[in-house]
Image (cartoon, rainbow, N blue to C red):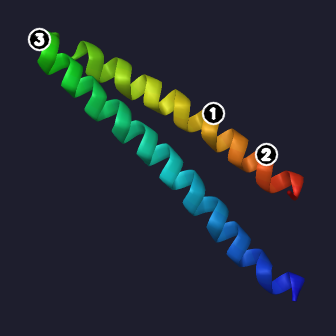
Amino acid sequence: MRHQRRPYQAMALYSAILSQLAGSMLVGLFAGRWLDQKWNTEPLFLILGLLLGLTTGIYAMLRTVNHFNSGE
């Protein structure tokens, strides 16, 4: 029974990682575009938002992987 649950746990981990990375980058993208339109600084906040979103996504991914590996 334990051997059959392993693929489902891996699929859950992969989908959590994907959603965290994609979601945080999309939030950074749209927030950066909104700030650029508001202050007329075309690519500045878009790039900063993407970098901040990527950083946040990687941090969340590492926390998720540590949580799955700890067995909680």
Q: In the image, which disc is placed on residue 66?
A: 2
**Sequence-earlier tag: 1 or 2:** 1
**Sequence-earlier tag: 1 or 3:** 3
Q: Amino acid at mark 2?
A: Asn
Alpha carbon separation for disc pair 1 and 3:
30 Å
Q: Position of residue 21 (x, y in %)?
A: 50, 44
* Residue 62 versus residue 7 in the image, above or below: above
**Secondary structure category for the residue under label 1:** helix
Q: Position of residue 55 (x, y in %)?
A: 53, 28
The quarter of the rendered structure image containing the C terminus is bottom right
Residue 42 shows up from this direction: no
Q: In the image, which disc is placed on residue 40?
A: 3
Residue 25 shows up from this direction: yes
Q: Nearer the viewer, residue 10 or 24?
A: 24
Q: Position of residue 51 (x, y in %)?
A: 43, 24
Q: Amino acid at mark 1?
A: Tyr
